[in-house]
Image (tube, rainbow, N blue to C red):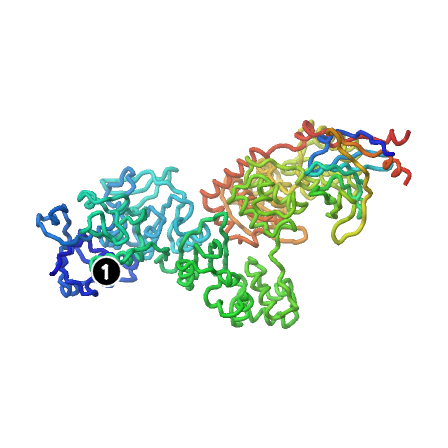
């Protein structure tokens, strides 16, 4: 059973932008798209650990600021000719608040 | 029974009408009145008479013998005083009363004289008849003339007098010459050609007053205070149908004398033809419709059913050396498309405007050989869908069977010039390909073809395709990104012409295939919008690369570098202490002196940025924009302050430049250098804009680079004063902002548009001022410190959203 942790208001994350959540094993990036969908991914590009939260968000993708790898926010899959995958975590928006799944964050700690 | 015809006015239309009548064997007795003391001559050939290419005798269309043969009674130099329509008589100036069966008006038009103060001075003339022409022909090299009006007539007058050595200035109220017939590009090419003939052209110039001395004109005063001295002032601003006599006679008149499709006026026995006529709301100034009217009028008089139909008109300028053609409508429009062909080296410009696969307008400059063919397509509303690919090349390349642009290239002889800039012929490119050059880059390296202005790139690729066959695939025109098929140039044009002031408006208008663009197009659009609409568009941080969004340079480990501005490379002990303190406080691992004469603090954590900026702000420092596609630094040497060789205060100029330019966004980074003497210690000649101070002033050169490409700047302009240097640099910066493709440094932009074009824009003082004004409008928004702004309004966004480390540890 999942337990949701309240993180922040939706408006704390800019549209087509991201903010970071600090965990013991590194940062999780919370993305908000132009259509107000919210996604949570590890803040590290599989290429050279680029900080994805600083990338340009377009559609449901983000472009890494270091070398322009494009990553799907929905699946974490690297798009185009490059290969790799970023860990994704369940995130949801209810009543204008963003929450993350505590179970998954804990699994991440274990992993 | 022989009919009595009275014709008022011996012009081109009435002359032609009489010819038709006599050709048809009309049994008529014609009396021809003319206010001018002569008979019919070809008025449109007055320009060649003026320039000396023809004599008056050569342009007479009907001589005394012709009038005698056809029993025409000539009363030249005599006006009609009144008309009695009930009695069907006219009364001449001398009091003779003559009866008529049919009366034909050909009273033509009067030149429009702007009622400015001084318009009645001696020496202020129009350009309408032989008398005007003869006045101009008496002038020579010792004379100065001002022509008001940059239309067809004004320019022909100007060119004719210039050919006689007269010092001529054309004053035109609109932004470019012949604006009714030409688009801006063709207007620009024309202006350039006229300037080369020694004619001074002033556009966007408003005449205010004609100044006189002893009743004779001596100068034209513009409303900006400029005084243009002249011995003769020619006003060629337009014509108005001469309707006075017709109106007095009670005929229906509007702008012209109203006629129906048979050229009959509101009185069934009175016809009218020519420039005095208004037909279906239109009036006429070109010769082709006048001839059509003459034919219809003659047929009507002969009792033959005939109808005058207005047709598309075309214009050619009769100035030696200016090949110019214009027809139809060429304004931009939603449903309209352009096909444009340019060869800057040969000065050739062709533009076709299409609507639903029909050519509705054409402008041609430099090579008008095919103008008749294009005009035919416009007139006949031919559907050109099948020949669209090769249309612009003209009729020579429209064969039967499948039309293929490659066939046109394949058909070119070996000595056909492909690259005008470098004088490279098709044969040389073929030889290079035969020797192993298999792509554009290789051909360019070996032959230099397409390596200068680049406009012939497509042609070179076609030669490759023709020569190599299937081994070569022509790359598609590069679009901005996968979101659109449009090029940067297309998008910029759309943003300006359609007044697109938001990003969604651009996506919609330009048919973006994605919902909100991508990391490639959004930064470009953000720049174009803020550069073109500084007041309307609001900068979008989420469409900026992280460095510009966070006003710091991201490093490979996700930390940032912080570079405070040091104006002109000058700092103080206090500033240095504050930088040192900040480096200690935020545990900055690396402190480095940059090539732009300032100090870089590398390895600052993202969340510390607002705090370190605050500390630097408190010490009086602002962002150095070391991260921006915008003004970076102005590097200086010490100049006259300390150096024994310095010729000017190069440091002072550098500081002034940095203080006026900082904060501005540009297509790519913009680095300046100011050296106090030609020893060039500030390395100004490898900057985007470099200034070398010399004893006589400031040499401003542009287009340097010291990165992936290393280039030396090229001289744009030398100016005597510091103020002029600053204005010229602001102007060229604005020109670059308005015209260049995003991520083109100045040298790349310069390679596309040419240094000559840039220099001309900046040399033109009106244009320079306008550019500076637009730059200042933009700077009213952007000349401010983004660090201070972020410290006060956005500091919280730099922190983590939430810290879960404690929770996870539990």
Question: Which percent across, then down, holds residue B468?
Answer: 63, 70
The residue lying toward the viewer, choosing from B43 and B8, is: B8
Determine if residue B69 is in view. Answer: yes
Could you tell whether B773 is left or right of B19 in the image?
right
Q: Which residue is at the front of the view, A76 or B416?
A: A76
Could you say which quadrant of the image residue B65 lies in? bottom left
Q: Residue furthest left?
A: B96
Figure disc tally: 1
Q: Position of residue B329 (x, y in %)?
A: 42, 52
Label 1, secondary structure: give it: loop
Splitting the image into 4 quarters, where does residue B313 fall? bottom left
Give the image location of residue B49, x and y in percent. Answer: 27, 59
Q: Residue at x 50, y 49 (%)?
A: B335
Residue B623: percent from left, percent from top: 67, 35
Q: Image quarter for residue B363?
A: bottom left
For disc 1, the marked residue is B304
């Amino acid at each position: 059973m999942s337990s949701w942790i309240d993180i922040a208001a939706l408006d704390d994350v800019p549209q087509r932008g991201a903010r970071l959540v600090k965990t013991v094993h590194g940062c999780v990036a919370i993305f908000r798209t132009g259509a107000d969908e919210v996604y949570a991914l590890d803040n590290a590009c599989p290429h050279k650990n680029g900080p994805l939260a600083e990338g340009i968000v377009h559609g449901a993708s983000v472009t890494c600021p270091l070398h322009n790898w494009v990553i799907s926010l929905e699946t974490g899959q690297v798009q185009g000719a490059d290969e790799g995958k970023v860990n994704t975590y369940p995130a949801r928006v209810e009543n204008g608040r963003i929450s993350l799944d505590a179970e998954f964050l804990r699994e991440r700690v274990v992993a | 029974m022989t009919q009595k015809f009275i014709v008022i006015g011996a012009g081109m239309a009435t002359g032609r009408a009489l010819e038709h009548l006599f050709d048809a064997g009309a049994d008529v007795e014609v009396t021809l009145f003319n206010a001018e003391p002569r008979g019919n001559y070809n008025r449109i050939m007055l320009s060649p008479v003026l320039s000396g290419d023809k004599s008056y005798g050569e342009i007479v269309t009907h001589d005394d013998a012709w009038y005698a043969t056809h029993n025409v009674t000539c009363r030249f130099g005599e006006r009609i005083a009144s008309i009695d329509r009930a009695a069907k008589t006219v009364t001449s100036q001398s009091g003779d009363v003559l009866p008529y069966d049919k009366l034909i008006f050909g009273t033509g038009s009067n030149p429009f004289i702007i009622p400015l103060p001084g318009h009645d001075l001696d020496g202020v003339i129009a350009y309408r008849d032989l008398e005007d022409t003869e006045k101009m022909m008496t002038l020579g090299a010792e004379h100065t003339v001002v022509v008001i009006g940059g239309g067809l007539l004004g320019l022909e007058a100007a060119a004719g007098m210039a050919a006689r050595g007269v010092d001529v200035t054309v004053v035109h109220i609109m932004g470019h010459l012949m604006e009714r017939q030409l688009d801006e590009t063709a207007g620009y090419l024309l202006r350039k050609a006229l300037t080369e003939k020694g004619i001074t052209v002033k556009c966007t110039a408003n005449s205010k007053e004609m100044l006189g001395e002893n009743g004779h004109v001596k100068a034209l005063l513009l409303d900006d205070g400029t005084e243009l001295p002249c011995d003769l002032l020619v006003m060629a601003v337009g014509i108005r149908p001469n309707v006075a006599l017709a109106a007095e006679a009670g005929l229906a008149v509007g702008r012209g004398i109203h006629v129906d499709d048979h050229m009959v006026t509101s009185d069934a026995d009175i016809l009218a033809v020519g420039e005095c006529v208004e037909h279906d709301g239109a009036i006429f100034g070109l010769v082709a419709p006048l001839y059509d009217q003459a034919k219809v009028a003659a047929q009507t008089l002969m009792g033959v059913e005939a109808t005058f139909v207005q047709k598309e008109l075309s214009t050619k300028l009769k100035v030696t050396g200016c090949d110019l053609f214009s027809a139809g409508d060429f304004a931009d429009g939603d449903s309209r498309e352009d096909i444009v062909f340019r060869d800057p080296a040969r000065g050739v410009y062709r533009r076709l405007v299409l609507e639903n696969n029909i050519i509705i307008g054409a402008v041609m400059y430099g090579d008008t050989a095919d103008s008749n063919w294009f005009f035919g397509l416009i007139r006949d509303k031919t559907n050109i869908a099948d020949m669209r690919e090769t249309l612009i090349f003209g009729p020579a390349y429209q064969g039967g069977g499948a039309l293929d642009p490659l066939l046109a290239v394949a058909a070119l002889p070996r000595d056909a010039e492909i690259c005008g800039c470098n004088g490279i012929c098709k044969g040389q490119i073929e030889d290079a390909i035969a020797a192993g050059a298999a792509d554009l880059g290789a051909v360019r390296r070996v032959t230099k073809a397409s390596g200068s202005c680049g406009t012939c790139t497509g042609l070179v690729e076609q030669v490759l395709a023709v020569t190599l066959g299937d081994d070569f695939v022509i790359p598609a025109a590069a679009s901005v990104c996968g979101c659109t098929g449009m090029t940067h140039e297309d998008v910029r044009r759309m943003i300006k012409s359609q007044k697109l002031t938001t990003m969604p408006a651009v996506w919609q208008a330009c048919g973006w295939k994605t919902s909100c663009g991508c990391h490639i197009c959004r930064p470009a659009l953000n720049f174009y919008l803020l550069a073109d609409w500084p007041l309307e568009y609001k900068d979008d941080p989420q469409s900026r690369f992280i460095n510009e969004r966070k006003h710091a340079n991201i490093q490979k480990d996700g930390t940032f570098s912080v570079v405070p501005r040091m104006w002109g490379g000058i700092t103080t002990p206090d500033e240095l202490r504050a930088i040192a303190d900040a480096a200690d406080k935020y545990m900055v691992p690396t402190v480095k002196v940059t090539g732009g004469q300032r100090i870089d603090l590398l390895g600052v954590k993202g969340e510390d940025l607002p705090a370190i900026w605050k500390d630097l702000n408190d010490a009086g420092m602002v962002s150095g924009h070391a991260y921006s596609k915008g003004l970076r630094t102005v590097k200086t040497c010490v100049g006259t302050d300390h150096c024994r060789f310095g010729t000017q205060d190069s440091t002072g100029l550098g500081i002034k430049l940095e203080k006026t330019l900082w904060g501005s966004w540009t297509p790519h980074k913009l680095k300046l250098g100011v050296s106090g003497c030609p020893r060039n210690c500030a390395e100004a000649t490898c900057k985007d804009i470099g200034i070398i101070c010399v004893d006589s002033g400031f040499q401003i050169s542009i287009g340097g680079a010291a990165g992936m490409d290393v280039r030396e700047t090229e001289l744009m302009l030398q100016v005597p004063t510091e103020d002029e240097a600053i204005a010229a640099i602001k102007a060229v910066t604005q020109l670059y902002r308005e015209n260049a493709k995003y991520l083109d440094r100045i040298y790349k932009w310069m390679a596309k548009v040419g240094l000559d074009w840039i220099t001309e824009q900046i040399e033109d003082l009106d244009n320079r001022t306008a550019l500076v004004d637009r730059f200042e409008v933009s700077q009213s928004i952007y000349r401010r410190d983004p660090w201070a702004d972020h410290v006060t309004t956005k500091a919280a966004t730099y922190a983590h959203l939430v810290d879960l480390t404690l929770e996870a540890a539990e």
